Image: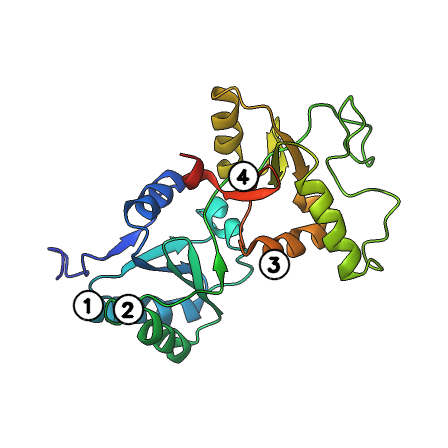
């Protein structure tokens, strides 16, 4: 099935974070391929062409072309650091993430996860969503804390480079249980570092939800450990009573 321009109907160019979120909400059983690209990167030309060739072979999958620098919120949600990068999802389940112009690896991943109607277990859970931060700010360079003394950034007295995985995991569980509603985010509620963060904070505030928060950009150890603990590779992560709820699209 093709459009009048000859492009397969199941190939879309993502024009905004809202468009991305709405498409992801439409079908939680659908396999979706995200192709992060940039016009200046020559290897992306080959991957973009491969996407056009893959799409007709997998008509029940959705192929999203995401220009990484034009859609930084979406790219940052999946920790895209280079282009091309391909992310394969089933609903909110991460099936594969492939960096570089590795068309055979993408072909193999599609053949494994998108052929037929069989559902396969993924590697981890994901959803595009926002991030948030503190209510008061200290002098530049000092960890941000609220009036009750709770830190919302990496503690200054911890050497993150020397911290053991066990200690990081313990800190993560303590943070997750610190408040009834805990938001692990990028930035702060008054200074969100991405559009998804801004919308998540706005949604929580509109609903009158009181929430605590922690800036994962300040603490790489917590950022990476939470992905493992919660099997959810993107941020923000909304935690209620110590349990992961999800991200922006789940909250909606």
Residue in the image at 53% along x and 63% along y:
82
Tag 2 secondary structure: loop
Categorize mark 4 by other alpha carbons within 10 Å: few (<14), some (14-19), many (20+).
many
Q: Quadrant of the N terminus?
A: bottom left
- Dot in front, 3 or 1: 3
Q: Residue furthest front?
A: 241
Q: How is the image coloured?
A: rainbow
Comes first in the chain, label 2 or label 1: 1
Comes first in the chain, label 3 or label 1: 1
- Dot in front, 2 or 1: 2
Residue to which mark 3 is pinned: 228
Comes first in the chain, label 1 or label 4: 1
Residue 180 vs 112, above or below: the answer is above
Label of residue 194 in the image: 4
Residue to which mark 2 is pinned: 118
Compute the Cα span from label 4 to label 3: 22 Å
Categorize mark 3 by other alpha carbons within 10 Å: few (<14), some (14-19), many (20+).
few
Comes first in the chain, label 4 or label 2: 2
Compute the Cα span from label 2 to label 1: 19 Å
Tag 1 secondary structure: helix
Compute the Cα span from label 1 to label 4: 34 Å
Categorize mark 1 by other alpha carbons within 10 Å: few (<14), some (14-19), many (20+).
some
């Amino acid at each position: 099935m093709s459009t009048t321009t000859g492009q397969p109907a199941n190939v879309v160019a993502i024009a905004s974070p809202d468009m991305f979120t709405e498409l992801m909400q439409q079908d939680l059983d659908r396999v979706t391929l995200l192709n992060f690209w940039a016009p200046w990167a020559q290897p992306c030309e080959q991957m973009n062409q491969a996407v056009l060739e893959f799409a007709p072979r997998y008509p029940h999958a959705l192929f999203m072309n995401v220009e990484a620098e034009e859609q930084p919120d979406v790219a940052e949600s999946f920790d895209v650091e280079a282009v091309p990068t391909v992310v394969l999802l089933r609903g909110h389940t991460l099936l594969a993430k492939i960096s570089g112009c590795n068309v055979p690896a993408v072909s193999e991943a599609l053949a494994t996860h998108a052929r037929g109607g069989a559902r396969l277990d993924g590697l981890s859970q994901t959803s595009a969503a926002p991030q948030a931060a503190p209510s008061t700010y200290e002098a530049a360079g000092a960890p941000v804390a609220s009036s009750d003394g709770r830190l919302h950034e990496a503690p200054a007295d911890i050497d993150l480079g020397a911290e053991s995985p066990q200690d990081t995991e313990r800190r993560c569980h303590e943070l997750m249980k610190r408040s009834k509603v805990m938001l692990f985010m990028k930035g702060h509620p008054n200074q969100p570092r991405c559009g998804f963060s801004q919308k998540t904070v706005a949604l929580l505030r509109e609903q009158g939800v009181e929430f605590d928060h922690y800036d994962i950009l300040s603490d790489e150890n917590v950022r990476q450990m939470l992905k493992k603990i919660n099997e959810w590779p993107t941020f923000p992560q909304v935690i209620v009573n110590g349990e992961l709820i999800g991200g922006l699209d789940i909250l909606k």
